[in-house]
Amino acid sequence: MSEPTPYPRPAYAWYCLGIICFAYLFGFMDRIIVGLLTPAIQKDIGLSDGQMGIIQGLAFAVFYTLFGLPLGRAADRSNRKWLLTAGTTLWSLMTAGAGLVRSFGGLFFMRAGVGVGEATLNPCATSLIGDYFRPESRAKAFGIYTMSTALGTGVTYLGGGLVIGFIGGPAGGNSFDMPLLGEIPAWQAVFILIGIAGLVPALLMALTIREPARRDLTRAAGEQASWAETRAFLRQNRTTLLCHHFGVAFILMAIYGWVNWLPTLFVRLHDWPVARFSIWYGIFGGTAGILSAIASGYVTGWFRKRGHRDGSMRTVLVGGIGLTLGTSIAPLLPTPELVLAGYCITGIFTNFPPAQALSAVAEITPNQLRGFVTSLYVFVIGIAGAGFGPWIMGMVTDQVFGDPMKIHYSIALVTLVMGLLGIALVSYGLKSFRESLARATWNGSVTG
């Protein structure tokens, strides 16, 4: 173990964060693009809402979470830059592969591969950001990192809408002339183009950023924590981690659900073409999400200046309350313009929970455990949020209301129930989070 060394130069740290965010942008595009393409896929190959809910969520989330734990452990013990580069390459290739299949089984397999690749993202990114940035800058850095989801949403909807509009509409029969492949359905072409483009950040990561020295090492463990030390940390902080992980997961269950089903809602209930909805939501919803991600770090800073050490989790709570109130009402509004406005205005809260939840993990977790604890968080939010959110909304439409034209009721109901559960857990966990913060004392040394 060496003497403390300086943090990387701020300009270089922000550049590295920019490359990680570039990868995350494509990763999030790969997650949600299937929601935009749902009407075209259903028309082309005849999948039900329940099946599409599995493709949107569970096919991705199950493998995202299963591989997240060993890959999180790998992030604590290996070169994070190369691990993330490999993951970015894999999820991009599997997204492109979704454009080469035309069945439920084929789409399930490709979405599972996207999940495996993206399982490297949050553990590596959380650990790397913690080592690139000083503690006082991390909340803002995590806010910028999470801004990639807003950019990904905006680019997916706006760019996808423009492509679909250029080709001529959402119907699965619309074709696109791809080199080497000839005429293929437009939805397959979108998968292929986005997947290929995702290889660009992987190349930049491989060639232009360096693995940073590890810092924030706990006094109690060596450079690599043993399983006994890992279990001891989890036991000591179990209330904090349970409330943090599951509270955020319930909130994200609502977010992932409506993000995936909104295009279908507008097509079914309001007769908006996918291109029209996606362009308008890409502009205004994407902008709101970007502002949300940036603002989240400042809100946390505002709480801390007023003596609240648990500022990051208070920001998560504020975001959960704002989202639950706004997005459980928005789908029930009488006109498409009001529905769109409701989601876009409420979008100012969208990235408060995911951004500051990651910042909170970095605050209470020593470097030797940061990747693994983040992977536990990813496991929970992956299954509950990204996995069950879209699927539950699809199943509620199919099985509870029994009418595809009542999708707005299923979105509102699932959003309200899951949001309230998340708010309750985060609120209950604030006291234990403060206790975890009080125990978080590092020796300041670095390795590398």
Image (cartoon, rainbow, N blue to C red):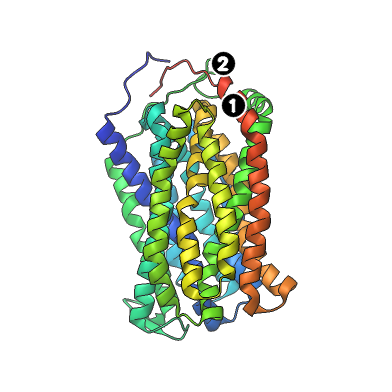
SS under mark 1: helix
Which sits in the foreground, 73 or 424?
A: 424
Amino acid type, mark 1: Arg
297, above or below 65, in the image: above
Disc 2: which residue: 220
Q: Are marks 1 and 2 in contact (CB under 8 Å)?
A: no
Q: Residue at x 59, y 73 (%)?
A: 104
- Please identify the residue farthest to the right as the structure is shown: 400
The residue located at (36%, 64%) in the rendering is 283
Residue 135 on image: x %, y %: 41, 27
Which badge, 1 or 2, is on the more N-terminal residue? 2
Q: Is residue 448 visible?
A: yes
Horizontal and vertical percent for residue 174?
42, 85
Q: Position of residue 138 (x, y in %)?
A: 41, 33
Q: Quadrant of the N terminus?
A: top left
Tag 1: Cα neighbours inside 10 Å, few (<14), some, or many (≥20)?
Answer: some
Is any atom of residue 94 visible in this view?
Answer: no
Above or below — where is 139 with respect to 86? above
The quadrant holding residue 26 is: bottom left
Q: According to the image, label 1 marks what residue?
A: 434
Q: Nearer the viewer, residue 376 or 120?
A: 376
Q: Could you say which disc has been placed on residue 287 in the image?
A: none
Total residue callouts:
2
Crowding at dot 2, Cα within 10 Å, few <14 / some 14-19 / many 20+, comes out as few
